[in-house]
Amino acid sequence: MNTTTNAQIAIVTGASRGIGAAVARRLAADGFAVVVNYAASSGEAEALVAELNAAGGRAIAVKADVSSAGDVRRMFEAAEQQLGKVDVLVNNAGVIKPTPLADTSDELYDRAFDTNVRGTFNTLREAARRMNDGGRIVNFSSTTLALNMPGYAIYNATKASVEAFTHVFAKELRGRNITVNAVAPGPVATSLFLDGKTNEQIQHFAKMPPLERLGQPDDIASVVAFLASSQAGWVNGQVLRANGGLA
Ligand code: NDP
């Protein structure tokens, strides 16, 4: 059944939890029909979709591992069939496991690059073929790229790739009026950041920015919402470091 909507359509990858869930909530509040993508957390994704629909929005949950080109193609097809042609793509899905380079297994390396780099590549390639002209793409980098902390070699390399995609893809979409930007958060209080850290380590990170706190998912969601909006039409090919001044 094709139940297309008049609202603009946004896909948010990795929207079952953390920053992605906050982005989905914010875009729904801003009037977008939202695809809540997830890989494993079906309970969280379905609960979020129920919440957004109960609030008067239009949302669907779509399971797709972004590292699979087939899954990503099927996710765009589900979006088109159930909501309509896509206007906004937020490439939020990502993984991290800080590990010294010398101790990184092949599996850990593959997981990081498959999700963060191949995942972004898969959705960008599909978006180029299928998104509406005039759309918006927001990729996810990280402020860790600027900090060069031990343990972050692999993760930073994946995010450097995402930034390279962002700069070049913005130019490759010339003539389509589609902007391609990235947001690079500092530490944000989600399980990705908090898991495996001691309270002392968390406090250390929280004190690093001059604003002396961790970022919250909503801090990042409001930046994504700006980049996804008509207000950001002249911002293109940029990386916006949303981190409370941490550098
Ligand atoms: P979380 O770990 O809280 O959430 C990650 C989300 O990504 C989940 O919804 C997860 O879904 C999804 N996901 C993971 N792998 C895949 C996959 N292969 N396919 C589809 N979805 C997937 O992370 P955050 O919200 O903290 O991070 C979001 C983004 O922000 C990431 O790109 C991260 O690198 C970046 N970032 C985060 C920072 C932080 O401090 N939190 C700082 C800088 C950047 P499921 O549970 O279903 O697998």
Image (tube, rainbow, N blue to C red):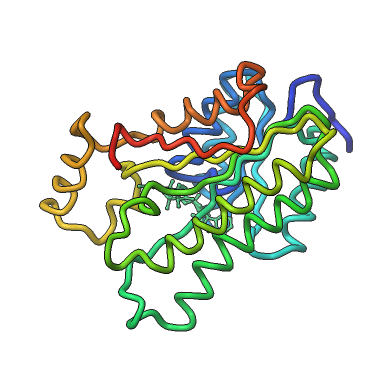
Q: Residue at x 84, y 43 (%)?
A: 130
Q: Residue furthest left?
A: 200
Q: Residue at x 56, y 19 (%)?
A: 29
Q: Is residue 201 above or below residue 242?
A: below
Q: Quadrant of residue 230?
A: top right
Quarter holding the N terminus? top right
Relative depth, front residue between 216 and 39: 216
Relative depth, front residue between 18 and 244: 244
Q: Residue at x 73, y 60 (%)?
A: 71
Q: Is residue 106 above or below residue 124?
A: below
Residue 211 lies, in percent from the top left, at: 22, 29
Q: Residue 10: in sight, yes or no?
A: no
Relative depth, front residue between 50 and 21: 21
Q: Residue 173: in sight, yes or no?
A: yes
Image position of 34 (left or right of 8): left
Image position of 2 (left or right of 136): right
Q: Residue furthest right?
A: 1
Image position of 83 (left or right of 184): right
